[in-house]
Amino acid sequence: MNELDLRVAELAREMLVTSLLLAGPVLIVGLIVGVGVSIFQALTSVQEQTLSLVPKMLAVLGVALLLLVPALGLLRDYTLRVFGQLLSFGLS
């Protein structure tokens, strides 16, 4: 592999890591709240559809708002690295 291929592979790896860092906490919270609500519904025999949807929505929204500033900073840093690499590729 030449140097250009290695840089492209590194950018792709950074993209995957960045997307995991952005989506991971929100998905994990949604999973935990969903399992908790499902256990509650199984124990109490309450099968209300909104009971499973509303807590998950609120939890995911809360985590997304809580992590908004760090996520935007992470995206900004990644974007600056990508644009810096584009300039070094000669693709500007």
Image (cartoon, helix red, strand yellow):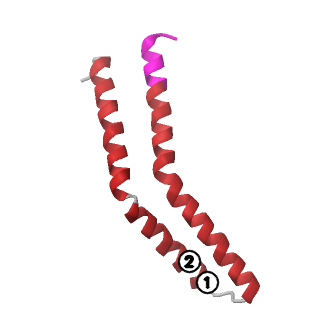
Name the residue located 48 percent from the left edge and 18 percent from the top edge. Answer: 6
The amino acid on which the numbered mark 2 sits, given as a three-letter code, is Leu
6 or 36: nearer the viewer: 36
Quick one: label 2, few (<14), some, or many (20+) residues within 10 Å? few
- Picture disc at residue 49: 1
Q: Position of residue 54 (x, y in %)?
A: 52, 79
Q: Residue furthest top?
A: 2
The verdict on residue 5 being magenta is yes
- Picture disc at residue 53: 2
The verdict on residue 91 being magenta is no
Q: Position of residue 2 (x, y in %)?
A: 47, 10
89 or 76: nearer the viewer: 76
Name the residue located 53 percent from the left edge and 53 percent from the top edge. Answer: 24
Residue 33 located left or right of residue 69: right
* Quadrant that contains the C terminus: top left
Secondary structure state at the residue bearing disc 1? helix
Secondary structure state at the residue bearing disc 2? helix
Name the residue located 33 percent from the left edge and 39 percent from the top edge. Answer: 77
The alpha-carbon separation of the residues under discs 2 and 1 comes to 7 Å
Quadrant in which residue 74 is drawn? top left
Name the residue located 64 percent from the left edge and 77 percent from the top edge. Answer: 37
The segment highlighted magenta reads: 1-9
The amino acid on which the numbered mark 1 sits, given as a three-letter code, is Gln
Q: Main secondary structure of the magenta part?
A: helix
Q: Position of residue 17 (x, y in %)?
A: 50, 39
